[in-house]
Image (cartoon, rainbow, N blue to C red):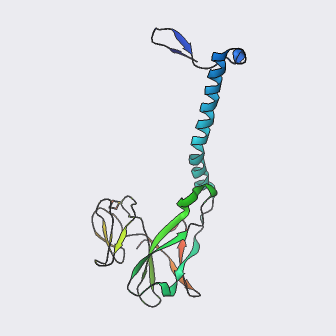
Amino acid sequence: MTNCNGQGEEVKILPDWKKVLVSREEFLKALGFGLSGVIALFATIPGVAFILNYLFVPKDPKWVNVGVIEKFKQGETALVGFHDPYILPWDGVSGHRSAWVRRNSDEDFTAFAVNCTHLGCPVRWKSDAQLFMCPCHGGVYYKDGEVAGGPPPRPLHRYPVRLVKGDVQIQVGMVLEES
Ligand code: FES
């Protein structure tokens, strides 16, 4: 492969492999070529891993504990954290997830995804106003997740919830209920 320099002379970009061991210039070209390849390889690993994970790792819904029932007060909404059961070793802290859990009555709970249905920013619960607010573009949701105003096209996504032996569990995976 060749390229032209400023004076119109042809400059070889690829090393002459036969002269790599006898010419310093060709050796440095080969070294740069090799290092560029290694850097490119490392740069593509996360993207390839993401695609392979998306295509081949099963995402059957799973139940995860988000706290004991007593932790949640009736009529209040609380942020809970949980560990994504589908994370891969290289996902790091991105495997930590959150959800908003509301205790409507004694045994009636609702869990909402934290992400706004507009562009995915994490919504915040404002207990004094009883509204979820999105900090990005002013989206507002009622306490039941329905859209109150702003650009969100849909209500907040909901996780299925169940109570098992005193624990509140939400179902995570590919399937989220619509409100
Ligand atoms: Fe929430 Fe745009 S991301 S309103």
Looking at the rendered image, the quarter that the N terminus falls into is top right
Say left or right for 172 vs 77: right
Question: In the image, 86: left or right of 128?
Answer: right
Instruction: Please state the horizontal and vertical placement of residue 76, each as a whole percent of the image.
Output: 39, 83
Residue 62 to residue 22: above or below = below
Position of the C terminus by quadrant: bottom left
Q: Position of residue 174 (x, y in %)?
A: 53, 65
Query: Image height check: is 42 above or below 93?
Result: above
Q: Position of residue 32 (x, y in %)?
A: 61, 26
Query: Is residue 56 found left or right of 171 in the rendered image?
Result: right
Looking at the picture, tell me which residue is in the foreground, 6 or 64. Answer: 6
Quadrant hosting residue 58: bottom right
Task: Give me the residue at 42% from left, 89% from top.
Answer: 105
Q: Residue at x 33, y 65 (%)?
A: 134
Up the image or down, 52 lies above or below 148; here it is: above
Relative to the observer, which residue lies in front, 165 or 171? Answer: 165
Q: Is residue 23 left or right of residue 7?
A: right
Taking the view exactly as shown, the residue that stands out farthest to the bottom is 106
Residue for point 39% across, 61% down: 121
Residue 123 percent coordinates (x, y): 37, 67
Query: Would you say residue 64 is visible in this rendering?
Result: yes
Q: Quadrant of ligand 1?
A: bottom left
